[in-house]
């Protein structure tokens, strides 16, 4: 294999054949191709795109680089959800225990923060003692026992994706539909699922900001899943403002716990329920007419919160945080942000918020940075709200005064107050299946 020739062909707009992709990825997995050549190829893919067959071959090569889980012995549906990433997106922490409490096995495999977005693993690890690095054997045993495990990508699952993902994060090649689609689906298909629900974010806080392109991303992932025997459904949801109020790891874990107890913000509850309904339908655990009621019952009866306690306990964490979220790590400095002027909130721009959380220490600027779980925001201001001068709009949670100053500047940029009308994207805009797109507004 002559790698410079393959890079050159992609650079000039050509395509690689399935056997070329297979050999290339196998050689990369074995360490026979250096990262710099892979990075050059990724940039060529980013600039030129991938043909449909190439995206499929990339996915198959990433899947083939690792093992696949098999839950056939459970004799029951195994369903997961994956989000394309956003700010304040703590849905997985609520949804996994909620759906597991309704009798569906949920092997939830998640990632760490990427770019300006937070990661489920970092949020879970803000719970004292919580381990996300379970082995495949531990994961399988926990699914048998508890019905749900919330883990990171193990070295056995699509290891080539893990390496390409890290390379893309530092070479400005994340925002590319075929690369995102193959990356997400390689992890999900390795989980041995009987169904998959995708939360495809759209708006300025998403990786793919344009609503048309987010549909294309959803359709690409659905095709990859369905072609490999995994029924796949996507919802297109809003990421032109943070989801819920909390942004930052421990703050989001607390908000997720409140949501599991039925006391969380409405938008988080609504998105979680919409995705949960799709998971129950794919699992054949409920009819369309009663799926939402099943989920509401699991929250209202306390079963969903109990399931989260069981998951936390099984993964070495302190389950008492569910009763008492004050046991989560707390920030040194807490300050209130007040409206600098009166008017209508026209926008709460999520990307500026997500970047600020990273800069305050809540995410990584370099691969091996430690994450501070305590920092972030609780933003009560919502687009469309009328505010008067000096009304509290947010709370800042920081390590020190420099963090508070950084956070204030970010809120000044992110929260736009004016005379105009806010036109937020619909919370759940569309449902995409193999049959097509159904607009929900
Ligand atoms: N999430 C993933 O798993 N991969 C991507 O490329 C982007 C988001």
Image: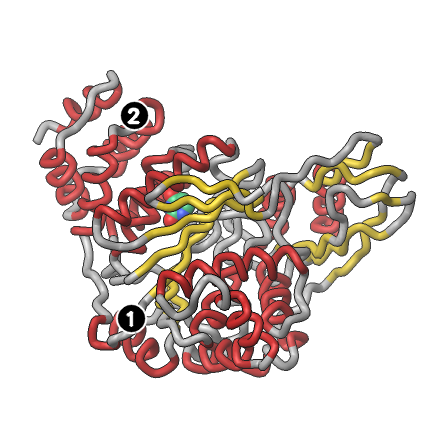
Residue displayed at 50% across by 64% down:
289
Among the two numbered marks 1 and 2 on one chain, the one whose residue lies closer to the N terminus: 2
Image check: 24 left or right of 374? Answer: left
Position above or below: 149 against 419: below
**Which quarter shows the C terminus?**
top right
Tag count in the figure?
2
Residue at 80%, 57% (x, y): give it.
335
Q: Which residue is mark 1?
A: 135
Residue 164, picture quadrant: top left
Residue 430: image location, x then y, percent? 50, 43
Q: Nearer the viewer, residue 131 or 278?
A: 278
Kindly identify the residue that appears in the image at 42 percent across and 44 percent down: 432
**Residue toward you, 104 or 168:** 104
Within 10 Å of disc 2 (Cα), the crowding (few <14, some 14-19, many 20+) is: many
Secondary structure state at the residue bearing disc 2: helix
Circle 1 SS class: loop
Report if residue 171 is visible in the image: no
| Residue 255 image point, x, y percent | 63, 65
Residue found farthest to the front: 289
Q: Is residue 96 left or right of residue 4?
A: right
- The chosen color scheme is secondary structure
- In the rendered image, the quadrant that contains the N terminus is top left
Real-space Cα distance between discs 1 and 2?
A: 35 Å
Q: Quadrant of residue 349?
A: top right
Can residue 370 be seen here? yes
Residue ID at (43%, 37%) = 215
Q: Is mark 2 within 8 Å of ligand 1?
A: no
Residue 31 on image: x %, y %: 17, 45
Instruction: Identify residue for label 2.
Output: 44
Q: Are marks 1 and 2 in contact (CB under 8 Å)?
A: no
Identify the disc placed on residue 431: none
């Amino acid at each position: 294999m002559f790698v410079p020739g393959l890079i050159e062909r992609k650079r000039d707009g050509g395509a690689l054949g399935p056997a070329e992709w297979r050999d290339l990825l196998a050689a990369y997995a074995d360490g026979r191709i250096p990262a710099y050549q892979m990075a050059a190829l990724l940039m060529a893919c980013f600039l030129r795109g991938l043909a449909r067959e190439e995206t499929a071959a990339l996915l198959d090569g990433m899947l083939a680089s690792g093992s696949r889980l098999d839950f056939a012995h459970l004799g029951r549906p195994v369903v997961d959800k994956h989000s394309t990433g956003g700010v304040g997106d703590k849905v997985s922490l609520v949804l996994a225990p909620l759906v597991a409490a309704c009798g569906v096995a949920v092997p939830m495999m998640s990632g760490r923060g990427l770019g300006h977005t937070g990661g489920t693993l970092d949020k879970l690890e803000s719970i004292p003692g919580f381990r996300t690095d379970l082995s495949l054997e531990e994961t399988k045993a926990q699914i048998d026992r508890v019905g749900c495990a919330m883990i990171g990508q193990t070295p056995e699952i699509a290891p080539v994706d893990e390496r390409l993902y890290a390379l893309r994060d530092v070479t400005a090649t994340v925002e590319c539909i075929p690369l995102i689609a193959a990356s997400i689906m390689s992890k999900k298909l390795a989980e041995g699922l009987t169904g998959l629900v995708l939360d495809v974010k759209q708006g300025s806080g998403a990786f793919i900001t344009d609503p048309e392109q987010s549909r294309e991303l959803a359709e690409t992932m659905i095709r990859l899943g369905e072609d490999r025997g995994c029924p796949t459904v996507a919802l297109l949801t809003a990421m032109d403002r943070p989801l819920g109020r909390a942004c930052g790891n421990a703050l989001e874990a607390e908000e997720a716990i409140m949501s599991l107890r039925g006391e969380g913000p409405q938008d988080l509850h609504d998105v979680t329920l919409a995705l949960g309904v799709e998971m129950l339908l794919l699992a054949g655990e409920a009819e369309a007419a009663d799926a939402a009621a099943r989920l509401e019952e699991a929250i209202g009866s306390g079963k969903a919160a109990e399931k989260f306690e069981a998951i936390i306990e099984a993964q070495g964490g302190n389950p008492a945080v569910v009763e008492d979220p004050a046991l989560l790590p707390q920030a040194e400095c807490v300050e209130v942000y007040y409206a600098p002027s009166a008017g209508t909130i026209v926008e709460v721009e999520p990307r500026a918020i997500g970047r600020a959380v990273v800069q305050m220490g809540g995410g990584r600027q370099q691969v091996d940075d430690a994450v501070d779980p305590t920092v972030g925001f609780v933003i009560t201001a919502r687009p469309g709200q009328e505010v008067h001068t000096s009304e509290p709009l947010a709370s800042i949670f920081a390590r020190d005064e420099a963090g508070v100053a950084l956070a204030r500047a970010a809120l000044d940029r992110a929260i736009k107050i004016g005379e105009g009308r806010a036109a937020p994207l619909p919370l759940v805009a569309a449902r995409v299946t193999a049959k097509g797109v159904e607009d929900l507004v």
